[in-house]
Amino acid sequence: MNAYVRGVMQRLETLYANETEYLQCVAAWLEMVEPALEQDPRYERLDLLSRMVEPERMLSFQVPWIDDRGVAHTDHGYRAQFSSAIGPYKGGLRFHPSVNAGVVKFLGFEQTYKNALSGLPIGGAAGGADFDPRGRSDREIMRFCQSFMIAMYRYIGADTDVPAGDIGVGTREIGYLYGQYKRLTGRAESGALTGKGLTYGGSKVRQEAAGFGAVYFLSRMLEHRKQTLEGKRIAVSGFGNMSWGVCRKAAELGAKVVTLSGPDGYVHDPDGVCTQEKFDYMLAMRRSGKDAVAPYAERFGVEFYAGKKPWEVPTDIVIPCATQNEIDAEDAARILANDVKYYVEAANMPTTPEALRLLRQSRTLLTAGSKAAGSGGVVVSALEMVQNSLRYSWSRKEVDRRLRSTMYDIYDVSVTEAERCGLGYDLIAGSDIAAFRKIAEAMIAQGL
C-alpha cells in the first residue's frame, strides 16, 4: 500500500477496531483499486478514499414488538446509507441474530460497488436488525416489520433510499414493510422498496435474479477459455434464493449443481439439483423455517454429511452462495487440490482474505468476485425501480434478457479495467476498479 492508502486504512482501524468484516472488505478493496489511484492523482488530492470508505449516514434504532403470548421484545435495527454519488441509496435488509453495526457497514460497502457496476443510477446502502424470524409466526413477523418501518420510514423513499430483501427478508417481509410505509406516509410509492410481490409492483425474475446473474457471469468466463456450461459439475453452498437461482439457470444451460448446504452440513446429489421437483423442494425447505438441508437427503435418497462443507466434493466449478467468510484457507486448499477450474463468488464476501489470496495465486483457477458475479439481484431490483417509474411490467423473458445483457456488460468492463491497469485477466481487481472510477468521477463532478 502507498502512504495515502495506508493512512486511510489506519484511520478506519482506529475508528472501527472491532468491526472485523467491515475492515476486511475495505482492506481488500483498497488493495484492488490502488493501481487506479496511481494512474490519476486527482483521487488522492481530493481525498476521495476517506469519503468512500465510510457511510454518509449511519442509523441505529430500537425495534420494540410484542409476540403472540403478549411478551414484549426489543431488537436493534440499523441502516448504513453509504453513497449517493450516482443515485439514491439502494440495498438490502437482513434480519438475523448476527446483524450489528459492523455487519451492516460491510454489506453497505459491498452493495455500493455492486450497484455502481449495474450501469443504473443507484447508490449503495444496507440495513437490518438482530431479529431472528425463524420459528416466529406470520403475525409476529408482521408486528416486527411494522415496528421496524416506524423507525426507518423518514429516511427512505424512491428518490432517497430504496431497501430490498436479504437474508431473513423475503417477499412476505417486504410486503409487511411496504404496507406500513404506505400507512405512515399516505403514499402508494411503489418505488420505495424492491422485492415486492407481483400483485403490487414487483418484478418477474426477482427471487432467482442473484443466482441467474452469477451463472450468466460464469458463462462469460467459460467463453474466455472457449468452453460452455454443458456437462459441468458445480458445488454450491446454501439453499436460499441465490442457490435456487444458480441451480435453475445452470440446469437450463446444461450444467448441474451437485451440492447444497446448511448450518447442519451438506448434501451430495450426483444426479444434480436439476428437476422441477427438486427446485420446488428447495422452496419448501426455506418455508419450513428449519434452516437445515438434511431433509433434502431424506427426500431424494442422497448422502448427507453432517457438520461438513461441500468443498470436499470434486467438481469443475465452485459457487459459494451462503454467507460471508464461509470459505477459509483450509477450504481454499481443498478446492485447489480438487483441480477446480472456476471459482465464482455469489454471496457477499464469502471468502476470507487468506483464502482469496491462495485462490488467486493459482494459474489454473479463474476467480470472480461477488461485487461483479453476485450483482444479479441488484440489477433486477434496479429494473423493478424502472418498471415502477414507468407504471409498466415487463415480461419474464424481457427481464431475463436485460439481466443477461447487464451481467455480460459487467464482465466486459471488468476485463477492460483490469487490462487498462496492466493487471491482465484479473476480474476481481477489474470490477473493483470499474466501480471505483464510476463513483469517484461522480463525486468529483459534484464537488466537495
Image (cartoon, helix red, strand yellow):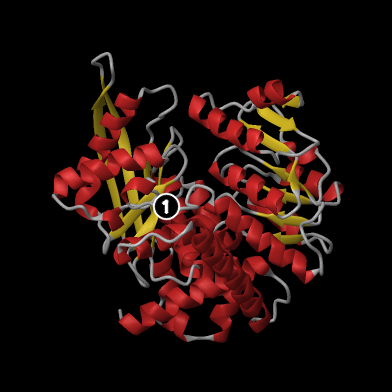
- Is 146 positioned to the left or the right of 427 in the image? left
Q: Quick one: SS at disc 1?
A: helix
Residue under label 1: 105
Q: Nearer the viewer, residue 356 or 89?
A: 89
Number of numbered callouts drawn: 1
Q: Quadrant of the N terminus?
A: bottom right
Q: Nearer the viewer, residue 282 or 123?
A: 282
**Mark 1 is on which residue type?**
Lys
Q: Nearer the viewer, residue 320 or 278?
A: 278
Residue 216 x, y percent position in the rendering? 64, 61
Vertical side of 77 occupied by 445: above or below: below
- Is 3 positioned to the left or the right of 191 in the image? right
**Is residue 118 at least partly visible in the picture?**
yes
Residue lying farthest left? Answer: 186
Identify the residue at horizontal 37%, vertical 72% (top origin). 86
**Is residue 82 at least partly visible in the picture?**
no
Vertical side of 241 occupied by 282: above or below: above
Residue 405, by quadrant, is bottom right
Residue 427 x, y percent position in the rendering? 66, 68
Identify the residue at horizontal 31%, vertical 66% (top origin). 390
Identify the residue at horizontal 55%, vertical 61% (top origin). 371
Residue 345 x, y percent position in the rendering? 64, 54
Identify the residue at horizontal 24%, vertical 36% (top origin). 146
